[in-house]
Image (cartoon, grey):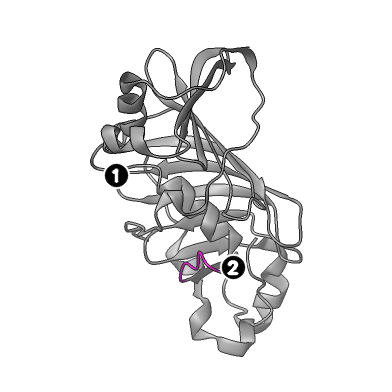
């Protein structure tokens, strides 16, 4: 199965800074310097140049409460990814996901018994559907991760004028010295102090109800392998027969 690029909502559609754990905190919040604004303006461009990364994400699952964690890889060049999912929707939780511009594909092992009544010949079915970042929390999370890249740097001068943008502090994360910078009022980036690589992204939705923390590791080209074509089941083709599939997560 070929996975194509994912068109996502702007990454800043739903972000607000969170408290994040770390060590060796120094300094206090202040306005950005011109140099810091330039560094912050290039964060997403550096991600695009890196092509991809592995990531670990923890987020508020949705209106039902609880936490969802997602661990996988993102290919920023082709806007696609794959990940393991823990927590989230009950019953029939998503355990593995693949995504691109055109679809989200979910593996829900506990749904196999229901699927066997509809398609008894399909083993280990993977449910395929269109992305829906409005109604589905999982899709919102995937859009954030995928949207953290840009083919061009931001405008540092405009960023300096943006209300809320600030140097927050220096800190330590995973034994690396970091600078913590806020983009506007709602987005926080942890950057390696030496290389300026993105170590952590913090955000939330506009109502401050769904915090998200994404840690990035192992930057470089990532190859996303899709599920076996024989296991794919397009939900749209089965209407009411698969009506029991819950929103995810």
x and y percentages locating residue 247 in the rendered image: 64, 69
Residue 50 shown left or right of residue 229 in the figure: left
First in sequence, mark 2 or 1: give its number: 1
The quadrant of the picture occupied by the C terminus is bottom right
x and y percentages locating residue 189 in the rendered image: 48, 31
* Picture residue at 65% right of the left edge, 74% below the top: 245
State the SS at label 1.
loop
| 107 relative to 217, above or below | below
- The answer to which of 37 and 63 lies nearer the viewer is 37
Residue most toward the bottom?
A: 240
* Picture residue at 44% right of the left edge, 19% below the top: 192
x and y percentages locating residue 182 in the rendered image: 48, 32
* Picture residue at 58% right of the left edge, 77% below the top: 121
- The answer to which of 233 and 101 lies nearer the viewer is 101
On residue 123, which mark appears? 2
Residue under numbered circle 1: 77
Which portion, as a residue range, is magenta? 130-134
* Picture residue at 67% right of the left edge, 25% below the top: 21
């Amino acid at each position: 199965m070929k996975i194509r690029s994912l068109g996502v909502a702007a990454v800043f559609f739903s972000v607000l800074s969170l408290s994040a754990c770390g060590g060796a905190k120094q300094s206090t919040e202040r306005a950005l310097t011109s140099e810091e604004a330039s560094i912050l303006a290039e964060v997403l461009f550096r991600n695009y140049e890196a092509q991809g990364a592995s990531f670990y994400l923890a987020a508020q699952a949705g209106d039902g409460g609880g936490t969802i964690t997602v661990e996988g890889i993102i290919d920023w060049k082709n806007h696609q990814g794959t990940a393991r999912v823990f927590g989230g929707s009950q019953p029939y939780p998503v355990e593995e996901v693949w995504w691109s511009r055109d679809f989200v594909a979910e593996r829900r092992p506990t749904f196999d018994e229901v699927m066997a009544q509809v398609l008894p010949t399909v083993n280990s079915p993977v449910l395929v559907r269109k992305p829906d970042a409005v109604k589905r929390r999982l899709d919102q999370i995937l859009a954030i991760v995928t949207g953290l890249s840009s083919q061009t740097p931001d405008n540092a001068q405009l960023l300096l004028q943006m209300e809320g943008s600030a140097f927050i502090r220096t800190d330590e994360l995973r034994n690396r010295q970091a600078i913590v910078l806020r983009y506007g009022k709602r987005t926080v980036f942890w950057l390696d102090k030496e290389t300026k690589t993105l170590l952590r992204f913090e955000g939330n939705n506009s109502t401050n109800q769904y915090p998200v923390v994404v840690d990035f590791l192992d930057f470089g080209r990532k190859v996303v392998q899709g599920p076996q074509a024989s296991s794919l089941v397009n939900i749209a083709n089965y209407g009411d027969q698969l009506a029991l599939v819950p929103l995810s997560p």
